[in-house]
Image (spheres, grey):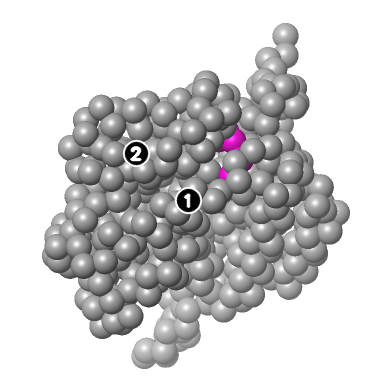
Amino acid sequence: MEKKFQVISPIDNHQYLELSYSSQNNIQQALSLSSQISAQWKFSSLSQRKQICLQAVENILAQKSMIAEEICWQMGRPIRYCEGEVLGFAERARYMIDIAEHKLANIQIPKKNNIERFIQRNPCGNVFVIAPWNYPYLTAVNAIIPAIMAGNSVILKPSSQTPLTARRIAAALHAAGLPNGVFQSLYLDHESTEKLVKNSNIDFVSFTGSVAGGRHIQAAAATRFIGMGLELGGKDAAYVRPDANLEKSVESLVDGAYFNSGQSCCGIERIYVHEHIYESFLAQFVEKVKLYQLGNPLNPETELGPMVSIRAANHVRKQINTAIADGATACIPSQLFTEYNKDSPYLAPQVLTEVDHSMSIMKVESFGPVVGIMQVTSDEAAMNLINDSEFGLTASVWTTDEKIALKLGQQAQVGTWFMNRCDYLDPALAWTGLKNSGRGCSLSEIGYEQLTQTKSFHLKLDL
């Protein structure tokens, strides 16, 4: 009997889709085909791969309106922002395509005693990409396009909340001329996913998701010597110094905290503000949050849509209520969003003050539209609090002093340090995390190193 799953749209809690999980026979056929084609695809020319991938990007862009509506229905992001994900997909893909020739070229070593020496980069083989629901295209592209450009075959497991991602990417690649089997997708439950990680035909795993999910994936691969990239949780912080441009800092940090209903890997979840500007910053921040239009994400005027599910929203509600019970102050009056203060995926934005690091709201990932704001007395105090976390994905400083920003950045225990910016991935920079935010790297030139294996050639030209 087929095992099915449903996509429940957070917009109105109706069943948007019902699909069947891939059967064991489907999975075995996909693995067999992937192994067969990868042995051929690795000898394809880089120019052929580039032509196909660039055309696939154009194919995705040609469907951006349809894709945007599907994203909205599947996970609830306001429609006004959904095409931005498609444009981000194109930006990252094009960058990784453009640098492939340089990054995948042989590394030539000067001759020594009539010996020709070089290092070659070869594909890993079969790359298994496990993508999340919150940015289903932006996260998937980080691995899919560079993996194909490097000569690997790819199997994508989309989130069961956003399964149409796999269909659109597959159609775009196949229409661009990608040989059958180089890219495939499977709908998998947790058990089948872990079994696939253990399968000897899988050579690399790229996973984006929770810390708990990452531990399961790592445990599944524990007996195998394969590469792995894990992008996990975060509790990303910002520090606003007394010399910051207050208006611009407020505007950017409000967006960084509440965009996508706070469901962003590198979204701002905690803010530390110097005491000299704390009151002014807080007043401006709260007033800006109060202006949000929360409602049906299909309405072009809506700025804040539902969270992905009632369960996710209730997790954040519980965090907020616990913090208030422990002494925190809620700055956003509940009567501003009365119709959304109930058991539903729609959650009003909240700002909490009088918080500290004994509270889960400042330590445990929220992944929702809430931020805690603390007053600090110095750079040292702010950095101690930023580093007082099990996570280390990104953090930011808001200042006009570049030297101070660089100095503090050296102290920050994170994979990406921003000055006057947050919640953004530059494809030219390595995307990586420290501590429980994961391991490995995607994007940038370094991202290709994970998706290839090095092979050294030592050619003595005479006997």
Count of numbered circles in the view: 2
- Please report the residue visible at 72 percent of the width from the left and 9 percent of the height from the top: 1
Task: Depth check: give the residue in front, 249 or 277.
Answer: 277
Q: Which disc is residue 275 wearing?
A: none
**Image x and y of residue 352, in percent:** 33, 43
Secondary structure that dominates the magenta span: loop
Q: Say above or below: 101 vs 148.
A: below
Question: Local crowd at mark 2 within 10 Å, few (<14), some, or many (≥20)?
Answer: some
Q: Is residue 198 magenta?
A: no
Question: Which amino acid type is shown beneath numbered disc 2?
Answer: Ala
In terms of image quadrants, where is residue 102?
bottom right
Q: Say above or below: 429 vs 158.
A: below
Q: Can residue 53 be seen in this view?
A: yes
Task: Residue lying at the far top in this picture: please name it.
Answer: 1
**Image x and y of residue 430, in percent:** 44, 65
| C-alpha distance separating marks 2 and 1 | 12 Å
- Please report the residue visible at 24 percent of the width from the left and 78 percent of the height from the top: 404
- Please report the residue visible at 72 percent of the width from the left and 69 percent of the height from the top: 50
Q: Name the residue under label 1.
A: 289
Task: Residue lying at the far front in this picture: please name it.
Answer: 335
Question: Which amino acid type is shown beneath numbered disc 1?
Answer: Val
- Please report the residue visible at 68 percent of the width from the left and 41 percent of the height from the top: 297
Q: Is residue 34 visible?
A: no
> Quadrant location of the C terminus?
bottom left
**Image x and y of residue 55, in percent:** 80, 64
Does label 2 or label 1 sit earlier along the sequence? 1
Task: Depth check: give the residue in front, 109 or 371.
Answer: 371
Per the rendered image, the range of residues in magenta is: 304-309
Q: Mark 2 points at which residue?
A: 330
- Element on which disc 2 rests: strand
Left or right: where 199 falls relative to 375: right
**Image x and y of residue 346, in percent:** 57, 32
